[in-house]
Image (cartoon, rainbow, N blue to C red):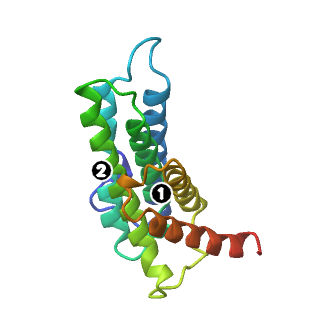
Amino acid sequence: MCPTHDPGQDKSSSVCRFARLFESSSLLDNIHDILNSPEAGHAPNREELMLNFQTLINLQTIVTEEVGDGVQLYSGAIALSNAALLVAFEHGTKVPHMPGETDECNTCANSSLISVLSSMTSSIGIFKLGMQVIDFNLFQPLVAFSVYKAASIVTMRLLSGDCDILDEGLNVLRSLRWLLKEVGKRWLCC
């Protein structure tokens, strides 16, 4: 058994945090490969994709418990997990229409995409409302990447007129862009 999975292991140690980051990165890579590298003329392997989803969601739950409330924004593992979910659910919403089969896939992907975006927006909300100050010494670049990815998805949906899946699309976009602006002030000295 990997020492980072030992129940007695200090979950705040750098080894554990790096292991969780590596695990999230591997799952993001797996999901990306499954969605974008299917065999010629074949759809992505659903069973393999679902196993990776389940593993990713389980890992995200474990990491969320390990980092605790209020510091999820600083977790690179959660950011990579969110990025993987965003990539997968965005892909699911774009599956070409085939009667019966894809309707369920598109509906599930839309609701899951909304759930991930809501989760990200709520974790940003405590900082946007001034309830907590962002500690840029703990802030990871991967978080900015996942927020940027989420903002690009919301922007594309708003521009395409596909706002029905995002009742509060503009508010979500404002929250995401607020964080990117705050990060830009610090990192880019803007």
- Mark 2 burial class by Cα count in 10 Å: few <14, some 14-19, many 20+: some
Image x and y of residue 10, in percent: 37, 66
30 is higher (above) or lower (below) than 148: above
Instruction: Spot the residue most to the right.
Output: 189
State whether residue 125 is above or below residue 8: below
Q: Which residue is mark 2?
A: 111
SS for tag 2?
helix
User: What kind of element bears circle 1?
Assistant: helix
Residue 186 falls in which quadrant of the image?
bottom right
Q: Are marks 1 and 2 in contact (CB under 8 Å)?
A: no
Residue 19 visible, this orientation: no
The residue drawn where x is 38% and y is 23% is 44
- Does any portion of residue 163 appear in the rendered image? yes
The amino acid type of the residue labelled 1 equals: Ala
Q: Residue at 63% of width from left, 75% of height from top?
A: 182
Q: Which residue bears the numbered disc 1?
A: 79
- Residue 33 location, x and y as percent? 48, 29
Mark 1 Cα-neighbour bin, 10 Å: few <14, some 14–19, many ≥20? many
Q: Residue furthest bottom?
A: 131
Instruction: Determine whether 20 is above or below 99 in the image.
Output: below
Q: CA distance from mark 1 to mark 2?
A: 19 Å
